[in-house]
Amino acid sequence: MTQATILITGATGNVGTQLVKQLDAAQVPFKAIVRNGDNNDYLKSLPLAEIIHADLADGVAVSEALQGVEKAFLLTNSSEQAESLQLNFVTAAHQAGVKHLVKLSQFAAAETSPVRFLRYHARVENKIRALGMAYTFLRPNLYMQGLLAFADYIKKDGQFYAAVGNARISVVDVRDIAAVAACALTAAGHENKIYDITGGEAITHYQVADIFTNVLGKPVRFIDVSPEQMEGAVRAAGFPEWQVGGLIEDYAHYARNEAAVVSTAVPEVTGHAAIRFEQFVEDYKSLFV
């Protein structure tokens, strides 16, 4: 096997799974840090993947994994420790001599944001800049795949809910996010770039419902709820408090129409048009009917 000089974190999640598929298709060898207990059957099937079992909280294991790595993709699952884990990884990567960090951030990341998730992503971005490493910051908007959380509601009740009003959001498919990440990791010219990654159009949740109706061939309705109602529902579903607060802040950001910008990053970086929401519903249709 060719020696891998790319390290992937978050390889078993939504974006990570699509990223490793694309690296495999391009026959690019890579290392992947995977926690014990994560489902990595797909990774095990890839001949060019070197799987390293470690927790990002284990500084020694992370430092060992980073030896010989030139480029790293930084993504952690959503947790209360995400910021500290990412900051520790950045420091370890710098000490190990990693030349280029590709970080999955979030659209509108800023240290002054009222949204806690946008603040933490900005703090990690700024740490990478401060250390002088080459970087590519991927700032995707709301994931289309995030609507899979409503799959049971759409399947059983023909409706879904959010506190977002009539705001437009340039939702993006995780497959496009992964495609941009793959380009940043395997091609030159993406150093010290920030890519806002969006779909090709900004649509409302009411339009989302219309698209579900047309593609699924059954009525689907969007119900706008108050932030208080959404907060109660999320809490009742068992989400931890830090995540409840973060989600409500995220949706307040969307409701203020602050996520309606349409960028050209996907076609410019990958050479193909961004996946349309209709295509997403068609591809995941079996989960909604």
Image (spheres, grey):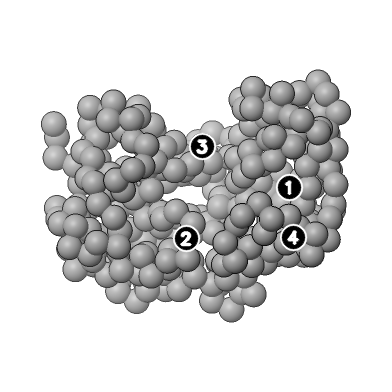
**Label 1 element class:** loop
User: How packed is label 2: few (under 14 Cα within 10 Å), some, or many (20 or more)?
Assistant: few
Residue 43 position in % (x across, y down): 31, 33
Q: Which residue is more in the foreground, 78 or 104?
A: 78
**Label 2 element class:** loop
Q: Do residues under tags 2 and 1 come within 8 Å of each other at their CB atoms?
A: no
Q: Residue 202 — which label?
A: 1
Q: In 3D space, how far apart are the residues under numbered discs 4 and 3 (Cα atoms)? A: 32 Å
Q: In 3D space, how far apart are the residues under numbered discs 2 and 4 (Cα atoms)? A: 20 Å
Residue 123 position in % (x across, y down): 45, 73
Q: Nearer the viewer, mark 2 or mark 4?
A: 4
Q: In 3D space, how far apart are the residues under numbered discs 1 and 3 (Cα atoms)? A: 18 Å
Please name the residue that numbered disc 3 is placed on: 175
Say whether disc 3 or disc 2 marks the residue closer to the N-terminus. 2
User: How packed is label 1: few (under 14 Cα within 10 Å), some, or many (20 or more)?
Assistant: some
Q: Residue 232 — which label?
A: 4
Say whether disc 1 or disc 3 marks the residue closer to the N-terminus. 3
Q: In 3D space, how far apart are the residues under numbered discs 2 and 1 (Cα atoms)? A: 28 Å
Say whether disc 4 or disc 1 marks the residue closer to the N-terminus. 1
Task: Tell me which residue sits at (29%, 45%) in the image.
Answer: 36
Rendered image quadrant of residue 227: bottom right
- Identity of the amino acid at label 3? Arg
Q: Residue furthest bottom?
A: 112
Residue 178 in view (yes/no)? yes
Please name the residue that numbered disc 2 is placed on: 79
Q: Do residues under tags 4 and 1 come within 8 Å of each other at their CB atoms?
A: no
